[in-house]
Image (spheres, rainbow, N blue to C red):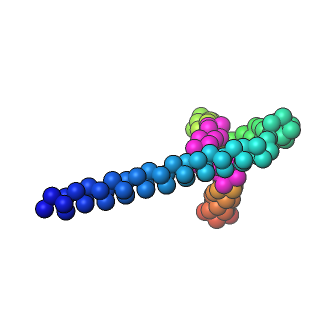
Amino acid sequence: MQSLHEERIHTYLITFLCVREKQQRELEMGEELSQETHHSTKKKGGLIIMPFIIANEAFERVASYGLVPNMILYLMSDYNVGVAKGTNIIFLWTTATNFAPILGAFLADSYLGSFLTIGLGSLLSFLITLIGVGYFGH
């Protein structure tokens, strides 16, 4: 009975040591790979793309501010919304569009990555536009 118990302990000990040795080898291999990839990666972004980001934001602001007077007129003429209620709707729309990049940045940095976030945001914007045109279009 005791020999069976000793044999099990011996088997568990050997299994533990084999698993530990395998983990140690994988850790060493991972460190070697990370050092190789660290030296071979090229720095992305930086100041090279900064003018494109600034130009994109500038054009977005111009388009957004140019839309506000037209949107007020549209709400007042087609939907018979008063000036106060139309101003509140435009304020909420402006607030949502100004804070949406914060949500996008959080999703991009935490979960999805920048390209997937931009792609999904563009697709979502396009689908919302199609739905809006189909629903509100004359």
Which quarter of the figure is the C terminus placed in? bottom right
Please provide percent x and percent y for residue 62: 81, 38
Residue 133, horizontal then vertical, whole percent? 67, 61
Question: What range is drawn magenta here?
Answer: 98-117
Q: Residue furthest left?
A: 1
* Secondary structure predominantly adopted by residues drawn in magenta: helix
The quarter of the picture where the N terminus appears is bottom left
Q: Quadrant of residue 101?
A: top right
Is residue 78 in view? no
* Image quarter of residue 45: top right
Closer to the camera, 98 or 101? 101
- The front one of 30 and 126 is 30
Q: Is residue 69 left or right of residue 28?
A: right
Name the residue rendered at 62%, 38% in the picture. Answer: 102
Residue in the picture at 47% in, 52% down: 21
**At which x and y percent is residue 77?**
68, 48
Based on the picture, tell me whether residue 115 belongs to the magenta stretch. Answer: yes
What residue is drawn where x is 49% and y is 55%? 22
Q: In the rendering, at what x and y percent does residue 72 appear?
A: 69, 41
